């Protein structure tokens, strides 16, 4: 079996991220691995065509990143106890950034949540998890949110 020394845990800092972090911690502890927790803040460069001054966009993105760094620091402290964890906030398209950080950091595995979007939402927003799974040379564990999960399997008929 390949050695797992570093796990990249991609987060959106939503309530579901706690579940994703729980899986990452459980695996890291059992494998003796460290974790890189990553949040990708959205880039706003696609809005430059709307004649919004670039300095306004840069300022807004800076505020998003600053807030995300504080939230990430707090999230890591609360959810990754007992495991060596580094929190990172990057700006860009989430799937690309997750794959770039995994490569740069020499990650052995990626763990991330899904939103389980269907229908028009999936067409409009796509799926970051799907893009990562399809383009990653690493194993990717995706965690889908489920209501009522308290440990153990939850099955719906």
Image (tube, grey):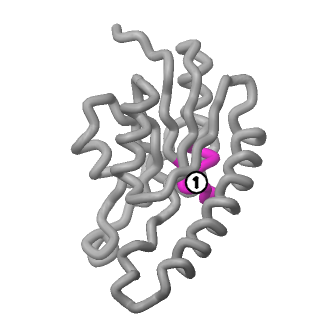
Q: Which corner quadrant of the image does residue 110 belong to?
A: top left
Residue 42 placement (x, y as % from top left): 47, 65
Q: Which residue sits furthest bottom?
A: 51
Foreground residue, 148 or 116? 116
Looking at the picture, does residue 157 appear above or below residue 139?
below
Quadrant holding the C terminus? bottom left
Nearest the viewer among 73 and 9 is 73
Quarter of image, res 46:
bottom left
**How many numbered circles does the render carry?**
1
Report if residue 121 lies within the magenta region: no
Identify the residue under disc 1.
16
Q: Residue at x 36, y 66 (%)?
A: 117
Residue at image x 49%, y 44%?
Answer: 10
Q: Horizontal and vertical percent for residue 63? A: 66, 68
Left or right of residue 80: residue 96: left
Residue at point 45%, 37% (across, down): 111
Local packing at callout 1 (Cα closer than 10 Å; few below 14, some 14-19, many 20+) is some
Q: Which residues are magenta?
A: 11-20
Q: Position of residue 52 (x, y in %)?
A: 46, 88
Quadrant position of residue 85: top right
Residue 58 lies, with reference to residue 115, above or below; the image says: below
Residue at 73%, 54% in the rendered image: 70
Q: Left of 72 or right of it: where is 93?
A: left
């Amino acid at each position: 079996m390949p050695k797992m020394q570093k796990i990249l845990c991609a987060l959106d800092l939503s309530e579901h991220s706690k579940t994703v972090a729980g899986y990452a911690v459980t695996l890291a502890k059992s494998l003796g691995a460290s974790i890189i927790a990553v949040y990708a803040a959205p880039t706003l460069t696609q809005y430059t065509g709307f004649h919004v001054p670039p300095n306004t966009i840069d300022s807004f993105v800076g505020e998003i990143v600053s807030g995300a760094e504080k939230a990430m620091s707090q999230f890591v402290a609360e959810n990754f106890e007992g495991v060596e964890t580094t929190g990172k906030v990057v700006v860009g398209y989430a799937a690309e950034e997750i794959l770039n950080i995994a490569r740069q950091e020499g990650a052995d595995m990626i763990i991330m949540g899904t939103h389980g979007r269907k229908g028009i939402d999936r067409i409009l927003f796509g799926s970051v998890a799907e893009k990562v799974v399809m383009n990653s040379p690493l194993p990717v564990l995706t965690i889908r949110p489920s209501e009522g999960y308290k440990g153990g399997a939850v099955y719906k008929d």
